[in-house]
């Protein structure tokens, strides 16, 4: 996927989060382990969010691999340590398709 398409998907994901009571903390947080697309908070829980887009839900969600999840977790831990945070957190995904935007909480493989 091109960076431009990725940015459009992330913009749609951020709009969805805003509409559903999340506060965006940071976008595109990088560490030596990888990148987190969106970091947001809602009701005292920090959400590390991977955005995936595709023509349909199945194609998009299948792009969250074991390797990608490991990188997401390591990068989330880096963010917590860097900011000296001791908070409740979760690793989530937002799937963006032409028809809808859907939040998938607590992703695991």
Image (cartoon, helix red, strand yellow):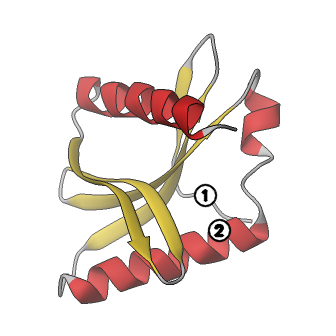
Q: Does dot 1 land on a helix, a strand or a loop?
A: loop
- Residue at the disc numbered 1: 107
From the viewer's perspective, is residue 15 above or below residue 98? below
> Label 1, label 2: how many angstroms apart (C-alpha)?
8 Å
Camera-side residue of 4 and 26: 4
Estimate the x, y position of residue 55 in percent, counting from the top left. 76, 21
82 left or right of 27 in image:
left
Q: Does dot 2 land on a helix, a strand or a loop?
A: helix
Q: Mark 1 or mark 2: which comes first in sequence?
A: 2
For image coordinates 43% across by 32% down, the residue present is: 13
- Residue at the disc numbered 2: 69
Q: Which quadrant of the rendered structure holds the N terminus?
A: top right
Q: Counting other residues with Cα less than 10 Å from the Cα at mark 1, is it few (<14), some (14-19), or many (20 or more)?
A: few
From the viewer's perspective, is residue 89 above or below residue 80? above
Q: Quadrant of residue 88?
A: bottom left
For image coordinates 81% across by 33% down, the residue present is: 58
């Amino acid at each position: 996927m091109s960076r431009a398409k990725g940015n459009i998907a992330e913009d749609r994901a951020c709009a969805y989060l805003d509409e559903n009571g999340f506060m965006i903390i940071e976008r595109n947080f990088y560490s030596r382990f990888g990148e987190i697309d969106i970091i947001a908070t809602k009701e005292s829980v920090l959400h590390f969010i991977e955005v995936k887009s595709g023509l349909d839900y199945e194609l998009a969600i299948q792009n969250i691999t074991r390797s990608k999840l490991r990188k997401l977790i390591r990068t989330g831990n880096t963010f917590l340590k860097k900011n000296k945070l001791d908070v409740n957190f979760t690793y989530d995904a937002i799937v963006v398709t032409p028809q809808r935007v859907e939040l998938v909480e607590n992703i695991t493989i």
